[in-house]
Image (cartoon, helix red, strand yellow):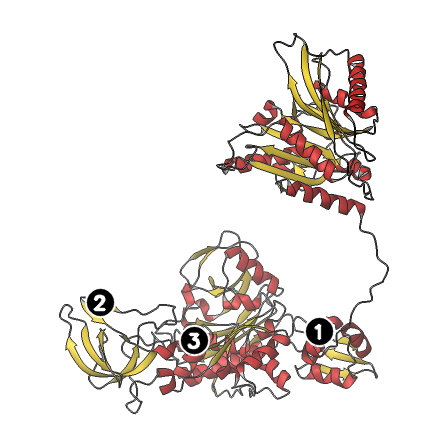
Amino acid sequence: MIVSLSWLKEYVPIEMAPLDLAEELTMAGLEVESVKDRFAYLQQVLVGRIAAVHPHPNADKLQCCDVDLGDRMVAVVCGAPNVAVNALAPLALPGTVFPDDAVLEKNKIRGVLSEGMLCSAGELGLGSDRSGLMLLEAHLSVGAPLAQALELSDTALEIDLTPNRPDCLSIIGVAREIAAIQKCELRCPEIQIAATKAKIDDHTSITIEAPNDCPRYVARLVDEITIGPSPFWMQDKLLSVGVRPINNIVDITNFVLMETGQPLHAFDFDRLAENRIVVRTARTGETFVTLDQKERGLTDGMLLICDGKRPVAIAGVMGGLNSEIENNTSRVLLESACFNPVSIRKTSKQLGLNTEASHRFERGVDPQGTIYAANRAAQLMSDLGGGKIIDGIIDAHPRPFTPATIRLSTDSTNRHLGTQLASADVKSHLESIAFKVTPIDADSFAVVPPSFRVDVTRPEDLMEEVARLYGYNNIPETYPLIPAEARKPSRQLDARQRVKEILTGFGFFEAINYSFMDRGACDQIQLPDDDIRRRLVDILNPLSEDHAVMRTSLVPGMLAAMRRNIVKQIKNLKLFEVGKIFISQGAAQLPLEMEMLVCLWTGARFNESWLTSKTACDFYDIKGITEGLLTGLEVQKPHFTALPRADCCYLQPGFAANIALGDHSLGVVGKVHPRVCAAFDLEQDAYLLELNLGDLYPLIPEHKYFQPLSKYPATTRDITLIIDQAIEAQAILDQLTAAREKLVENIFLFDVFEGQPIPDGKKSISLRITYRSFEMTLEDESINRLHHDLTAKLLKVFKATLPT
């Protein structure tokens, strides 16, 4: 909502500076977004005297003018018909920004340089006349800025209103708030109607067939109107709030709309069939051509304003082309109505048509303000259009307005607001904005909101009014009572956050997918028929077929995310998701919820760089992420064992492992099965890690323990064994760990080899053992003896041999 100070001052004396007023309005709940000088753009427009006029050498309808600015002459090309020597006119210099945001630049017009532009009133936003130059009075000072010469000074405030304040969608509404802030009186225009002897009931009638959607419809009739331009003062006021002037009758309806907040509509009375109005709802299949010359398809329930035969307006939204005001219009039927906000909002949204009228009707207009607005517009039509007002007013009012009475307690108000206001203060604040306040007892009031405050329906609304009028800055600061006892954070939340932080540190991005999936997702990831993840929970109102059931695995969502990224040419991906899956336990019970983690890695191992060659990620990359994650969580070292073919499901046999911590099986890691990739239209390999976080969280130690570093040096010894191919290297590592030799600090597998000269069915593995003592420097003899004993034990347990 844009308001100008010059217009506001007609209803309330404004004693504050514009910026101070903006601050006060903002603190009262009417947020002022900007404060602008309406005529700032005229600083580049000067009063110019046309010193000479010459024919344009290359155009018959253009003339070359020498314009005197007092201190210099400016050459201008002009096509206005009223150019005359010694005439004063506005001259815009290069850099001028016009109201339509066009920027003036030096330019050659038909080969002749023009260093400025002689302007009409319409081009400068000072009226609607664009037929010729805006001729200025002869006494004005040549070269002076136009705003200064014409004493044009006004400030416009742009106010961002919340939807619950439709009463401030008007100049009078904002003026009422200023009057309350300044504690002064609001001056509304007085209306004096000089009516003819003819009676309106003899000329027209109003029939309301949809009283729930149109509780009140007021009409006035004005005869012998002359259509023409509005006076400058009205055009200026409309332009100040961003409304384009059209003609005196249309401008009056827009003027009263912006002044009072009550939308009006003017019908050409002679174009109304049977000279009457019928308010009814549309029937599906009806069409209607609105004022913007577009045919609108109507649906059942849309509210229409009709004459005796056809629709003439979409109620509360836009009038029709078949009854608009034309240049030969002489009789006007003026509509001032109150419509159901829900009905207008639905119609506006369905038609995609938002207007100044619908914007107000959707939020609720003053049901008692219809007659005042109709009378105000009728008087202006008489004054500015020469019309004669037909005596009487038709007020069809099938749903009379009944004001609500709200009980307000001063004590309750103070407790809610944290104030110490007296009852008299509460009463004074509410009465300053036209609330009727009647004391009930020493603490309570019976408050009747004015009809224009459709948003006030309960005591809390009244408390809000008291707070903003008292001043939010005046309410003392208080702090909540916070118990000194510290509470431990939730272990689960803390562990979940640590998981995310570790994976983010490894370069993974978090994905968040829907908690729903396609019913066929279980088939896509090849789940066995007896897998519990096939126990699906149906959704009663699914968003789509792709989201018909609650997800029982995070894997389908992650593979779908991979496909979406690859389609967009993002082929190197490291994603993870933490979320719940839902396993049905029957219709009588809630589903079993399990928190899971899924990580996906596909594409390159390293980011593209001149330092590294392009290498695809593999099983050992995702396995390393698993080890790094568990190490970061400070849980015991995991065991990876080959996953049986029957348990692989969506992973490829031979490239899949089970993850265990002691006796706990936590999940799986491996390469996505080619058939699963094909089911998701994936043409590149992908590697997945899936962990059950619900089982992992209890294994994360709650406390950290410090172990000092040894000050003595370490020494290493290597072991190379030839063993059966079926023996896993992990078994050998476990055997060495089980020996619990206190001098063994670390065991590292650094080589695996198959092929000649290794016999068939055998493989060679090489281990490096690091030895260190916390008490002394180790001697080679003792280490060699210990290393020999460990080697001998491995040879015996695994029936291994040493290489020759």
In the displayed structure, does residue 7 sit left or right of residue 419? left
User: Residue at point 82% right, 39% down?
Assistant: 698
Could you say which is closer to the camera, residue 11 or residue 575? 575
Q: Mark 1 points at which residue?
A: 464
Q: Mark 3 points at which residue?
A: 239
Q: Spot the residue most to the right.
A: 485
In the displayed structure, does residue 737 sit left or right of residue 685? right
Q: Mark 2 points at which residue?
A: 108
Label 3 to label 2: alpha-carbon separation: 32 Å
Q: Residue 419 sits in which quadrant?
A: bottom right
Task: Provide residue 376's location: percent of width, then percent of height.
Answer: 51, 82
**Is residue 203 in sight in this rendering?**
no
| Label 1–label 2 contact, CB within 8 A | no
Measured along the vertical axis of the image, is residue 750 above or below residue 452?
Answer: above
Task: Quadrant for the C terminus, please.
Answer: top right
Label located before the other in sequence (3 or 1): 3
Task: Provide residue 431's location: percent of width, then percent of height.
Answer: 69, 83
> Which amino acid lies under the numbered mark 1 shown in the image of this protein?
Glu
Label 1 to label 2: alpha-carbon separation: 61 Å
**Is residue 436 in sight in this rendering?**
yes
| Label 3–label 2 contact, CB within 8 A | no
